[in-house]
Amino acid sequence: MKKGILASVSAYILWGFFPIYFKILHPVSSLEILCHRMVWSLVFLSGVLTFSRQWGWLRPALKNRRTVLIYSGAALLLALNWFTYIWAVKAGFIIESSLGYFINPLVSILLGVFILREKLRPVQWIPVGIAALGVSYLTWLYGRLPWIALVLACTFGLYGLFKKISPLPSLNGLSLETGLLFFPALGYLIYLEVLGKAGFGHLGVGMSVLLALSGVITAIPLLLFATGARSIPLVLVGLLQYIAPTLQLLIGVLIYHESFSSHQFIGFGMIWLALAFYTLESFINSRRYPFKK
């Protein structure tokens, strides 16, 4: 359990700093960045699998229809989440994208309760309600449906559910997901090169290196997340996800100077209050029943 919590926390801290990385890649189109993440992630993961001699799982996995369907669904959710987030950051919606990842824990908690039949103690519904109220207030404040936030929340919440029921170890599962996305992504990058619209190799050495490194910065937190999601309750996964959007919010406000009003602070404050409430209640309960799983 402790190892799973550490892995999840590490993943969310790394994700929290992603806006800076994608802001640097601003001259490259969002779709091209997405495809580079897919291609270079598989390259990196293939190197890890080759070094550790762990290719034996692939053929049985591809022959199992259920396994292929699970990871195909996870891969599509991941691609949609990645593209939406990259576009939002580049377009100046870091704060709204952080709202999506504040909503995401609610989605994970509800999926854990209603689909995986995980249990919440009655008092734990109080912070869930407070967080939902905060999200509703922020939605009203925006004056429109926060579609960026909702897409990010739902796609990653469902991705977490897929990882919870996935049969393969973290490294193998992520390799299969990126493998399923590899050829469409590579085909699009070749298409851009033929048209003369590719950024890779044409915007300077530094930009090309950053695009190639997108595989490493993508794969590492995903591996950590997959490890954590498989070993701790989905309810706890939902709770820890507040780390990344808090960092993203601070980056949007303090570094890129996106507007953040006092009214927005009230809405986000309600969500933070819910997190503090849930964390304190869980700590008190664990001290009261130290051997209860």
Image: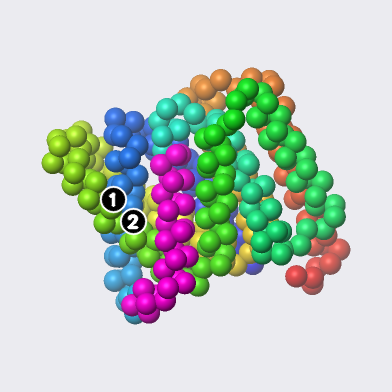
- SS at circle 2: helix
Q: Nearer the viewer, residue 37 or 9?
A: 37
Is residue 225 positioned above or below 214 on the image?
A: below
* Residue 163 visible, this orientation: yes
Quadrant of the frame with the C terminus: bottom right
Q: Nearer the viewer, residue 225 or 173?
A: 173
Report which residue position mark 2 lands on.
181
Residue 41: quadrant of the picture: bottom left
Residue 113: quadrant of the picture: bottom right
Q: Which residues are magenta?
A: 59-85
* Residue 206 visible, this orientation: no
Q: Residue at x 49, y 29 (%)?
A: 93
Is 81 covered by the magenta stretch? Answer: yes
Q: Position of residue 10 (x, y in %)?
A: 53, 53
Q: Residues within 10 Å of mark 2 (few under 14, many from 20)?
A: many
User: What separation in Å lies between label 1 and label 2 (alpha carbons)?
Assistant: 6 Å
Q: Is residue 262 left or right of residue 180?
A: right
Q: Nearer the viewer, residue 195 or 88?
A: 195
- SS at circle 1: helix
Tell me how the rendering is colored.
rainbow
Q: Residue at x 36, y 73 (%)?
A: 62
Q: Residues within 10 Å of mark 1 (few under 14, many from 20)?
A: many
Q: Is residue 293 left or right of residue 188?
A: right
Is residue 130 positioned above or below 92 on the image?
A: below
- Please identify the dominant SS of the magenta region: helix
Amino acid bearing label 2: Leu
Q: Position of residue 81 (x, y in %)?
A: 46, 45
Is 15 covered by the magenta stretch? Answer: no
Report which residue position mark 1 lands on.
185
Whether residues under marks 1 and 2 lie with C-beta atoms below 8 angstroms apart, the answer is yes
Quadrant of the frame with the N terminus: bottom right
Amino acid bearing label 1: Ala
